[in-house]
Amino acid sequence: MSRRPFIAGNWKMYKTGPQAVETAIYLAKLCSGVNDPEIMIAPTHLSLPLVAQAVKGSAVKLGAQNLYFEQEGAFTGEVSADMIKAAGAEYSLIGHSERRQLFGETDDTVCQKIKAALGSGLKPVLCIGETEAQRDEGKTYFILDKQISDGLKGFGLGELSELVLAYEPVWAIGTGKTASIEQVAEVHEHLRSLLERLFSKDLADRTRILYGGSVKPENVKQLMGIKDVDGALVGGASLDADKFIKIIKYNE
Ligand code: PGA
């Protein structure tokens, strides 16, 4: 099965509304005529409606960086999946390592958030990854398998057809240290076979598995050349549209 390549930008807590709009408009212009890969940017919640307008009618799609799993209620400071969907997003990152490390997110909350996203018609991008200490202790697959099996616990096959997976080794995020081609190839192959074991061959074949962690114009082509790598989740290098477009056009 051929999977459509997917390049996603995670803007983290960067850019005010006007700055996000400016970058988004320029990026949309740079992306005109690009059919593949699928392109997504995830600005802050606050900028979602503004950026939705800015990229309307372009090849650039919108995603959120996080959501809360309750539908509504007395949850001060949180934003629901319905609200994000209504703001114009199609995707939401879920379980990004910064959420797990800095904001106490667990595989259990990740699971609830995926459920909420699907319930609102948002496509979840489930982020997983091991820390440097976990890799050094030889626990990489134990951690990744747990993040997937607990994060996707209780879902039926039909529910996960739009799932996107992002493998982001924590030690490679924002550090300039990219995982080696061999490391990425081995993990991605493992993840696809895990999906097959947990769900089905069809789901494993259709699920796009992105790599994230210091992806830049200089290394994207090599990473995208790996058999089970279907895209990239890009942090720092997605903030500058002139840089990000080089990643998007990795094939040219
Ligand atoms: P980075 O971030 O590209 O800056 O390493 C990736 C991410 O956190 O998704």
Image: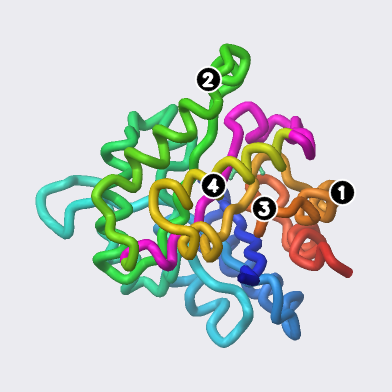
Viewer-nearest of labels 4 and 3?
4
Q: Per the image, is 167 magenta?
A: yes
CA distance separating discs 4 and 1: 29 Å
Return the residue at label 1. Answer: 218
Where does the N terminus fall, quadrant-wise? Answer: bottom right
**Residue on which disc 4 sits:** 193
Q: Nearer the viewer, residue 95 or 174?
A: 95
Q: Position of residue 121 (x, y in %)?
A: 32, 71
What residue is rendered at 24% in x and 50% in y? 154
Q: In this figure, which residue is indicated by the disc labeled 3?
A: 228
Q: Earlier in the sequence, mark 1 or mark 3?
A: 1
Question: Looking at the picture, which amino acid does disc 3 mark?
Answer: Asp
Find disc 2 in the rendering and name its residue.
139
* Side (left or right) of 226 relative to 15: right
The image shows residue 246 at horizontal and vertical percentages of: 82, 62
In the rendered image, the vertical position of residue 5 relative to residue 115, given as above or below: below
Q: CA distance from mark 1 to mark 3?
A: 20 Å
Query: Which tag, 4 or 3, sits closer to the chain's start?
Result: 4
